Amino acid sequence: MMTIEDPMNKKQAIPELKVHHKSAKKQELRSTIFAYVVLIALALLWLYPIMWIVLHSFRVEFRDGILIGTVVSHYIPKGFGLNNFVNLFQNTLFPRWFLNTLFVATVSFILSTIMTLSVAYVMSKIKFRQRKLFLNIAIIVGLFPGFMSMIAIYYILKALGLTETLFALILVYSAGSGLGFYVAKGFFDIIPNSLIESARIDGATNLIIFTKIVLPISKPIIIYTALLAFTGPWMDFIFARVILGETNRHLHTVAVGLYYMVHGSQYADGNQFTMFAAGSLIVAVPIVTLFLMMQRYYIEGVTAGAVKG
Amino acid sequence: MKKIVLLSLIMMTSLIMWGCSRQDPLVIWVGAEVQEFYEAKMVEYVEYYNSVNDSEFPFQIEVRAADTGSAAATFLDDMDAGPDILTVAHDNLGRLISGASAIQPIQNPALLAQIEAQNPETFLRVIKGSVGGETYTFGVPYEAQALILYYNKDFLNEDDVETWEGIWDVAKANNKRALSITGTDGFNNSFLVLATNAETGSTSLKLYEDGVLENTFGLGDDTMSVLKWGQRFFQDPNGARQPSDSGWEVDFANEAILSVIGGAWHFRAARASLGDNLGIAVLPQFTITEADAYGEIQPGTVFQSGTFTDTKMFVMNRSSDKLEYLEDILLFLSHKDVQEQSYIQNNTLPAYKNALSEFSAMQNDDISTQLAVAQLSMFDYGIPQPFGAEARFNVYYYQRGAPDLILAILRDPDNAFTTDALIFAEMERVQRIWFGER
Amino acid sequence: MDQDVSKHNGFIRFIQNTMNSVLSGGKQYITRFKTGSIGTKMSHLVMGSGNIYHKQFAKGLIFLGLQVLFLSIFIFNPEINNTPIGFKALGNFITLGTEEGTLFGALADNSMLMLLFGVVTFGLIMVFIITYLTNIKSAYASDLLVRSGAKPTTFKDDVTALFDSRFHVLLLTPTIIGVLTFTILPTLFMIFIAFTDFDREVRPGLNLFKWVGFENFTAIFTGTGEIAERFFPVLGWTLIWAFFATFTCYIAGILLALVINKRTVKFKKLWRTVFILTIALPQFISLLAMQQILSEHGPVNAALLNIGLIDEPFAFLSQAKTATTARISVLTINLWIGVPYTMLMTSGILMNVPKDTYEAAQIDGASKRQAFFNITAPYIIFITTPYLITSFIGNITSFNIIFLLTGGEPNVPGNIAGKTDLLVTWLYRLTIEEGDVNIGSVIAIFTFIITASATLISYRRSKAYKEEDTFQ
């Protein structure tokens, strides 16, 4: 697969290495400086929008006594304050939206995590007849564009009498979550089968093996799965918007509510960007903190998933 | 772990129980800007109901903020989930009643009498619809709306805004844009499409007149001249444009544009953009030049910008199980006093006739009165969207792409409409869409 | 090698397998009826009687209960929203409703619910058949146990088995139920919709729609109308987008990872964290902010104006003068979103580049550049190929970026698809915003075929899949 030895190089490279030893050091210094310059520039580029949102959320500028809510062209605000946050809590349903999202996220992350790990474990460690078939179906089924079938999902939920409750959203988020078993399966695959077999010889049932032996050593993947399941509802807005309806403002999640602050319909008072920024900050801070705290697990999961394919 | 599972199970079960055990409230959809107002009004109504009747009002009432532009469509998607009373613009009437009607006609004589007594003739015509050979009144008008001009008083004075050319000249002198429209739909191009000869007040344009599909015409010499004028206006770097990605509010605040065509629902945003510099006027006139003249229309002919004049009305969900209570509520909510209170609190324009002279609140000289006066004045130059008769008219006019084609003629980004013949051919296409041909 | 060949004809093999299992199932059915006890014979008519015969009352009653439940649904046709589920639903599925509704009295039949409930009823029948076969199998299993001198399993045994030998049933059931109701059922429903005339003028409950066969497909693929006119440009741009979005992010991500992982660079974790921030930030926030930052009066335009690079605000996104400008803009912003992922991925891989070969090469005197191109690069490419394919697929269905940044604009006059619309955003507009559900469904099916075949190809070539075969 990989050719590493090239006889031509071998002959020429050795004297080169010696001759350029000193300048090589200099070159390395130069390339290090270059790397730092690139990194700093890129970091600024990546932090620029984030900083911009933060600054906007605290921006308090007035025009003839009216708080300016739209985007302004100067980067650094001319005045700071908490007016946007106060507005957000007093004049919008944001607190309600926040609790809605928190509720949906909590319940659906518990359900999703249980379901995802269950499926992954079964697909990885339990041998049964139709296993391969299930595996193939699971991979194909997950590919149909989800929101395409939203209209049908809406009516199924309605037939179940659930359309105007947050429970509908919880079902939508967690029902299919088992299909996202792939990364977790990759993790379970690494656990040696011998571990499980020796437990079985000791008389442990499959339930005991799963809960007492496999899960305790699977902390990284549990956290990875839970992290994604918990943050999902905070980020999705298409499903939340269609399933819970645009008119039910008290049933919005934060994403839907905040979206309408920027893109109000033609008949609504749109473009309250500073309030959007304030709301975004309130949503983003816990989520980002959670992410950074769990960074290690996230990276492990992502890398494993990618390499496994 | 077990505890968590158990806990979540209990939580879910109780949620389902709660979801199933709730009693249906009586739901009313109104525009977001008046939601609080009507919520308070409904509290008043319940008090009133309880004092008149011996019994308590049997339902909880929820007044929800809904987007009145899309309310009809949302409602038709799922009637059962819809409210008991909803607010729609009158031009949605057609699609609500075509085929099997989704809304209930008004039968309460007191309410019918109040509607007849309160509203101007133009509205009375468009809230009625013919179903199975019988004509019924379906809607209860309670707000009116028309397009007007918002402008920047720093740059423009009252004389400038009498004509588009006046605004255009100032824009040229300051290297700004004269105008932004707020959206690209068929409502926004009405200032040109519905323009009338300022002298005679007439236009050859016809849109489904008397509810007849064939009574539609958009190829008159005057329409062509107006479009050619509009093309010059939209193509000029200092002329008219669509809103930028920042939004028209930001364009307005940054003085990139000097005026905006909008409705009352844009007032708050416009005021936030310009503060005390916000001016309000009726839509300006404009003069056809040599370059625009087409057919019989002589250079120098003056046109007055037009608008659709709408009424927002309450309608009743036909599948509501609370129908017997609804008409009494509407009688209360659409009363002229409530309309005036709503005007004072929310700047909504009353649908009541002679509001200009009858409502004391309209005699002030502040910006919100100017808003009302400008709109009421626009009613002289506007026509109610005449699509009430049939659902498909509305679809043909708005949804089949005709507004985009008109905007394409006006903006002409690829120089595809440089000759009269090309514009005419495109308008023929537009007219075919209006007729419902694909 | 022979095995390999047969593996690639998976579809044929699948058909064969299915045929075989149906045949053997049929044989079993007959054998069980012939050789089974009287209880088993009874089970062919009354579910659960075999179990009751063997005194497995709980199990038998559950089967019986299921049969009663199913038959009562099937016969009594309970109605939800005035539309029946049951055998009437099968007829309704064919007609899609006949009652046109009167003006103020009855509503029209709800074609959409009839279609949906038809699918549901088919599903119920399938579930019933499976339960029915399970019931016979269970009765026969007890027969065999008794014949061999053992006792039939008790209900407690069966429940215990769920936690041990049949643990996979317990673990998979919630997911199977969830996926059947909220993924497969709706998907089938939407596929059927593609064969109807459910467009923007249909309002379920007020007027009917009907089956039209392949009309929608021919309208898109061979027609000359607006939809057909837009379809191929949108498809083309979708593929171009997916290609460039994947490779730009891939290359830039690898370069970034290389810089961060450079031996002499300090604070590696800090640098990485900076970029992870973007992943953690909900996309609707970062994209809506980006849209405003790049807008005509946003800070970027202000800065460009200040420097004097431009004289008037430049439109990057939906108001862009040319489609190419808008497209380059969304691809660039996509870099901001996508690069951190690739960076993370390749960082992990870079640390795992086999050290010994690397060192060997160094000792052999290979220069850094040579070492990179001969060792690191092939290794990275080799190991990330599956990721490349999944991310290509992900980009085909990448909804948020286009929807939140441009909404598909700049628009093409007279058409509903804009110049940055991808298949998925276009079908969102068509279905959710415009109500042309039938055309949207055709596009969804098409998108599904593209992504599914790409996935299948990549998956079947992947290491994971090949290892799968050795597993059992």
Image (cartoon, coloured by chain):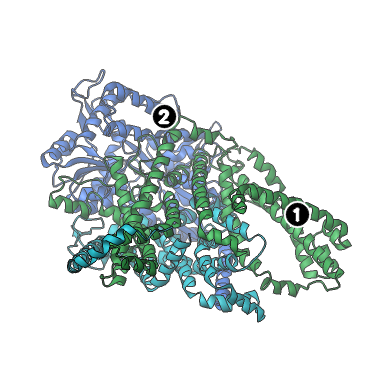
Chain colours: A cyan, B blue, C green
Instruction: Say what amino acid the circle numbered 1 marks.
Output: Leu
> Dot 1 lies on which element?
helix
**Which residue lies most toward the bottom here?**
A202
Q: Are marks 1 and 2 in contact (CB under 8 Å)?
A: no
Q: Which residue is mark 1?
A: C71
Relative height, residue C431 to residue A157 (above, below): above
Q: Which residue is mark 2?
A: B433
Question: Label 2: chain?
Answer: B
Tell me how far mark 1 sits from mark 2, CA to CA: 52 Å
How many marks do you count on the picture?
2
Q: Position of residue A297 (x, y in %)?
A: 43, 71
- Graded by Cα atoms within 10 Å as few (under 14), some (14 to 19) or many (20 or more), the crowding at tag 1 reads some
Instruction: Say what amino acid the circle numbered 2 marks.
Output: Ile
Question: Seen in the image, is A5 located left or right of residue B196?
Answer: right
Q: Nearer the viewer, residue C184 or C463?
A: C463
Relative height, residue A246 to residue A210 (above, below): above
**Which residue lies most toward the left here?**
B173
Q: Position of residue A4 (x, y in %)?
A: 37, 60
Q: Position of residue B106 (x, y in %)?
A: 51, 43
Q: Quadrant of residue C353?
A: bottom left
Q: Quadrant of the N terminus of chain B?
A: bottom right
Q: Nearer the viewer, residue C16 or C292?
A: C16
